[in-house]
Each structure stands twice: as C-alpha cells, then as structure tokens.
C-alpha cells in the first residue's frame, strides 16, 4: 500500500471542511425576540431558528400562532432557510402625519415599537407593533436585480376562528365579492380570497388582514388548507395575453404566465403585511394603519386636488324626465347634469361609458356629444368633468390621451376594468397615477383591486372601487343591509371606497325588484343617506338621476351639505355586520350617521364631543311608514348643547343622519 505525505495546510483545510459540515448538521439555537405595543395589549414574538416564525397575542390570548414566513428567489435561494442574524435594532416612534386628503382625521398620531432584524446575506425584516395591530415587511440590499419565485406566509389561528371571507373564483378579479361568514376550518382546501379579509377568534378578537406599500410586486391573496390556517397565494408574472372573446376592448385572456411572481430591483423594501388586531369592532373603522404604512406623497404641488361629490350617470342610465329633448348620451343631457350639480354645489360630473366615439377611440367624442363644449360649460358653472376610460386603450397611448384631456380642461379620469393584480398591472396603476398627477388630473380606479398605498403616494388618486357596491342593484339582490354593514369593517378599512351611494328608489325584501335601467336599493332611503357620513370616499357619487333628486329637494339639499373629507372621526357604536354609528367633524360642524342591518335599533348618542354653547341640529330619519314604503323619511330640527343626548331610532335596514352646527 502506498502512503502519500499530507501537508499541514491540507490537513487544516480538511479539518475546516469537516467542522463546517458538522456545524451545518447541528441544530440551530433559537433566537427569540419580543416586541410589545405601546399600550402593552399586543405582544409579538419572533422566533429565528431553522426558519422564521412569529406569533401574536392580545391581552395574553393567542391570536396568530407559529406564522411562518419566507421569500424565495430564483436559484431556489430561500431567505428564511437557516437565516443568520447579524444585528437587531429596536426603536420607538411617535410622529404626526397630516394627510393631504384626510379620509378620517386631519392629524394622525403614528406611534409604534419597531424591531429591525438584519441578516447575513444583505436582507432584513422589519416588524412594527402599534396599539391597533402589527405589520412586517422584507427588505433586500442586493446589487443585481432579483427574480422572486414565491413568498411564504402561513397563518395559523385559534380553533373555531370565524371569517368574513371574500371568496374568489379566479385571480383575474375586480374584487367585488360578498363576504361569506363561516369558520375557516369549514372552507374547502384550496378556497381562496382577495384582501382585505376579517377573522374573529372565539374570544371575539378581530384580525383584519391586508397589505400596503404595494409597488412593483403582485397583490396578495390568501388560500385555505382546510384547517385553521391560511397561506399566501399570488398571481404569477404575466408573459402573454390575448383579447377575450367577450368584451375584447376591456377583458383579456392570460395565455402564458411565468413560473415566478416578479422581477424587480435587488435594493428595495417589499409590501407591508398588515394585521389590525382589536377586541373592539370600532377599531376596524377608526384605524388608519394602512395609510400610516403607505409611502409618503411624491407630489410637491397638491393645491389643485379638490375632493368632492359627483353627479354620476351610468347607474341611472341617463334617465331624466321633464325636459324638452331626448335623454341619452348627448350634450343636452349632460348640460342637465351640470346644471343639477351647480344648483346643489356638487363639484363634478362623470361622463361614463358612451361619451367617446368608441370604447377604444377615446380622444374623440360620439357625434351627439361635444365634450369640449361641456367642459367649458362646466367651468362657467364651477363643475368639473371627469372622463371614463378603459385601461387598455389608455395604456396604448397614455401620454397623448392624457395630454388631450388636459388640453380640453377635464378634471380627471375614471379608469376601469383592470381586473388583475399581477406585477405589471400593479405597476400600471402607479404609471397612471403619476402621469395624471403631472397633468393635474384626478383619478378614480374602477374594476380595481383594493387600495394598497397608492392614494397616499399619489393623493390625486381619490378613490377606488374594488367593492361590491350599489351598481350591483342593477342585476342582483346582493347589496343587503347586512352587506352594507360588513363593508365599513372590511373593505373600507383599506382605504377610500367608491360604493356610489344615493339610491332614491328604495325597497324592502318583500317589494324589491331588479331593474337594470331604473335600479332600486335594498333598505330605506335613510340607509342610503347615512352612507354619506359612514362611508369614506373623497370622490363621493350621487348615483341616481338628477330628476329624482330634483323631485325631493329636501333630501338633495341635505346630501349636498355633507363633506367628503374630514377633520376628525369618532366611532360611537359598532358591531360588524349589525350596526355602525359614526360622528365626523368638518370645521366646526359635526355629522353623525347611523346604519343598521335588518334589525330595528335605537341608539342614545352622547353629544359631549360638541364645543360649548348652543348648536342647531338638522336630522333626517326613517319615517313612520318606512316598513311599508322604504322611501319614507322625516326631517326635524332642534337645538342642543354638549350636555344633551340624541336618540336615533332606525327601522330594519334603516339609517339616521344628523348635521350639528354651532
């Protein structure tokens, strides 16, 4: 046998290899970090060992247990696999945020505790704990661009946790879903939902889940596994599409997807994953957490951004009466809309589908309608004109089209039918928002995913649909009072919600009918009116025909007084899907709105939030015959001070509104 001499250097190298192998095969010692909310009620625990998991308790009760997270890059590199901590940084922050377009309050206190974990390998995780929830996000500091193959988020909840679950059938979605109320362990494996989603533990602790700071990345969905957990699901990167057979001007058929989620810069922060946590249903309506975690505004000049109310045409099918010209998609009809808006101080009208020569030729108007003349007439009347467009033709020639609208003097665009949340579509939203802002144009996104930070980054984006709203009255019975009482605790918590309230034809369950061109709403007239206080949208529609509003000037005058942005919001009474009472202040005037589901209710409203002195109150409430005739209402006035109380009595499916002026 031949023995070869081995040098000391070779021996040393061999020992190093063996030691490294031994080290890699040994169990990793767990590193555990704890972070509490400023008020001490929420406790977050992060565990780093073979992977990364975190859990949350509320007042010592488990809320989220063993939540596993990971980020997989191309080459099968998983950032959460045997990660090595290089450094941790903790900090506390209390800052003031003054929203440029205040949805709830003109001043938000941004107070949290933060844990930043820096790992070897140029990536990090940031966790924040607020009094009303927790959030986390990944960040990377790689020199080169990266391909994201997958992102892991596995959420586990206590046994018998219930959900308000906006179940989806396809990732190609406009996010207009009903919220199914059932235990998550009864949902079939593979069932998935869009966001936001709301869960309630057996201890009645709410867990509201969504995301914000969504940039250059696909939107998050959540999928069940048939047990007590949900996991992340994402649209893959779209490589090829073809026009759909039905509605090819707006709908697409995805013909090829990549096997990854996104291709993006290596030096970036990823979206915040947000969890609002509270045992008080009022918190879901009051919280601004999604806004607080959104990117700050990119715009320097914003004084041209004017929130307001809108006379909308599509819901009412341009059905006007008592005029001496044919109603329809023509100049005379829209002059009528402008005159109506001017008479009641509404800031805008919308020219919805049909104003242009075709849905794809959107720089020329149809032969019966003179857009330039209408915009000029609107300027005389101090009413702006917003133009509806499909996203596909707008994208094909974005700069020229928006330059044309700017030259015409349009106030903004309503962009419709995106129906996707993959990376390229998310980027399209930002592209539209930025290009519109450069031309001082407002934006309202319809056929859209939920708000995810864009409205703070670009405050000219005043509203989003992404909600099963009033338009569904045209073809369904889905917009029940219960549905309208789920939305403020779910979809609206994410950001502005273009539900389009104001239906003037109202019915109960026994006398409601479906009429596409003359739709009705389920619930009372005052149920619809209360939405102008309860629902948040800086661009708020009056969905019905101007003729209907002209016929009831008391109602229209009442609506016209209600602002669309607020200096202060107080949530007085709340129960998810059952009822909601909200008080909002604009200047020195308070507005109180109350809504209930099918159950009649009465609320005692403490007015201690009023300033000293006497205040005049104007109230509109369900009429005495509202159960027979849902359009019945009563108006009354009285005088109160801060020591008084008001009793709000609501019929089933009813509403109540008060305007209180010093």
Image (cartoon, rainbow, N blue to C red):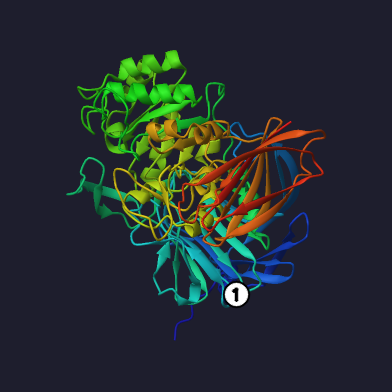
Q: Farthest bottom residue?
A: 1
Residue 533 against residue 20 in the figure, above or below: above
Instruction: Report helix, strand or loop for mark 1.
Output: loop
On the rendered image, what quadrant is the N terminus found in?
A: bottom left
Please say whether residue 38 is visible from this viewpoint.
yes
Vertical side of 187 occupied by 439: above or below = above
- Is 336 placed left or right of 527 in the picture? left
Q: Is residue 590 depicted above or below 163 in this figure?
A: above
Residue 292: quadrant of the picture: top right
Number of other residues with Cα within 10 Å of mark 1, as a class: few under 14, some 14 to 19, many 20 or more? some
Asked if one can make out residue 443 in the rendered structure from this viewpoint, the answer is no
The image shows residue 359 at horizontal and vertical percentages of 24, 34
Which residue position is annotated with label 1? 158
| Numbered circles on residues, count | 1
Q: Residue at x 21, y 45 (%)?
A: 247
Q: Quadrant of the C terminus?
A: top right
Residue 223: where, in percent of width, then height?
Answer: 44, 66
Q: Position of residue 13 (x, y in %)?
A: 56, 67
Q: Give whichever of 507, 88 is nearer the camera.
A: 507
Identity of the residue drawn at 52% across and 75% down: 228
In the image, is residue 483 above or below residue 239?
below
613 vs 66, left or right, is: right
Residue found at the far left of this picture? 245
Residue at 45% x, 21% y is 383
Side of 265 relative to 292 (left or right): left
Q: Nearer the viewer, residue 394 or 651?
A: 651
Instruction: Answer with the quarter of the image where residue 127 lies.
Output: bottom right
Q: Nearer the viewer, residue 304 or 64?
A: 304
Q: Point out residue 222 in the picture as x, y percentages from the top left corner.
A: 46, 62
């Amino acid at each position: 046998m031949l023995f070869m001499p081995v040098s000391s250097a070779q021996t040393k190298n061999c020992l190093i290899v063996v030691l490294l192998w031994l080290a890699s095969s040994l169990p990793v010692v767990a590193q555990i970090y704890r972070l509490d909310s400023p008020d001490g009620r929420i406790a977050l625990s992060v565990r780093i060992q073979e992977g990364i998991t975190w859990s949350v308790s509320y007042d010592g009760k488990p809320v989220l247990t063993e939540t596993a997270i990971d980020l997989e890059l191309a080459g099968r590199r998983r950032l959460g696999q045997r990660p090595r901590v290089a450094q941790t940084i903790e900090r506390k922050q209390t800052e003031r945020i003054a929203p440029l377009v205040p949805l709830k309050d003109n001043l938000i206190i941004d107070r949290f505790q933060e844990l930043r974990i820096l790992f070897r390998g140029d990536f990090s995780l940031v966790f924040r704990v607020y009094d009303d929830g927790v959030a986390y996000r990944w960040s990377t500091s790689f020199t080169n661009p990266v391909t994201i193959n997958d992102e892991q988020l596995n959420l586990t909840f206590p046994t018998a946790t219930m959900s308000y679950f906006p179940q989806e059938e396809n990732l190609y979605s406009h996010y207009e879903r009903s919220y199914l109320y059932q235990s998550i362990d009864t949902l079939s494996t593979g069932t998935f939902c869009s966001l936001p989603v709301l869960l309630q533990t057996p201890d009645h602790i709410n867990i509201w889940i969504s995301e914000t700071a969504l940039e250059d990345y696909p939107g998050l969905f959540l999928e069940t596994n048939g047990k007590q957990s949900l996991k992340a699901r994402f649209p893959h990167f779209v490589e090829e599409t073809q026009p759909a057979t039905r509605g090819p001007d707006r709908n697409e058929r995805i013909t090829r997807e990549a096997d990854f989620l996104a291709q993006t810069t290596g030096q970036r922060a990823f979206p915040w994953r947000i969890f609002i946590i509270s045992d008080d249903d009022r918190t879901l309506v009051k919280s601004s957490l999604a806004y607080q975690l959104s990117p700050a505004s990119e715009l320097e000049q914003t004084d041209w951004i004017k929130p307001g109310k809108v006379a909308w045409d599509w819901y009412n099918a341009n059905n006007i009466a008592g005029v001496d010209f044919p109603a329809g998609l023509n100049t005379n009809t829209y002059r009528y809309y402008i005159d109506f808006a001017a008479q009641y101080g509404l800031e805008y009208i919308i020219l919805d589908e049909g104003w242009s020569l075709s849905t794809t030729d959107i720089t020329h108007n149809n032969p019966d309608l003179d857009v330039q003349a209408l915009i000029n007439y609107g300027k005389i009347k101090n009413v702006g004109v917003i133009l509806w467009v499909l996203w596909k033709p707008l994208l094909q020639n974005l700069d020229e089209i928006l330059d044309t609208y700017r030259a015409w003097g349009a106030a903004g665009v309503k962009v419709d039918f995106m129906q996707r949340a993959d990376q390229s579509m998310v980027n399209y939203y930002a592209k539209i928002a930025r290009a519109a802002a450069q031309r001082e144009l407002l934006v309202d996104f319809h056929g859209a995913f939920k708000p995810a930070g864009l409205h703070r980054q670009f405050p000219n984006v005043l509203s989003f649909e992404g909600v099963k709203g009033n338009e569904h009255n045209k073809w369904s019975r889905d917009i029940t009072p219960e549905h309208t009482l789920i939305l403020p605790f779910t979809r609206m918590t994410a950001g502005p919600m273009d539900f389009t309230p104001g239906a003037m034809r109202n019915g109960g369950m026994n006398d409601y009918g479906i009429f596409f061109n003359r739709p009705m709403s389920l619930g009372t007239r005052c149920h619809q009116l209360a939405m102008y206080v309860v629902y948040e949208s800086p661009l708020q529609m009056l969905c019905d025909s101007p003729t209907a509003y002209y016929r009831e000037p008391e109602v229209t005058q009442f609506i016209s007084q209600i602002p669309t942005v607020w200096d202060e919001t107080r949530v007085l009474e709340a129960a998810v899907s059952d009822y909601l009472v909200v008080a909002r202040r604009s200047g020195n005037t308070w507005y109180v709105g109350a809504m209930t589901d099918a159950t009649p209710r009465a609320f005692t409203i403490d007015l201690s939030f009023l300033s000293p002195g006497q205040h005049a109150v104007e109230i509109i409430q369900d009429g005495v015959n509202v159960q027979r005739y849902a359009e019945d209402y009563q108006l009354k006035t009285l005088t109160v001070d801060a020591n008084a109380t008001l009793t709000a009595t609501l019929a089933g499916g009813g509403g109540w509104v008060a305007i209180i002026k010093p």
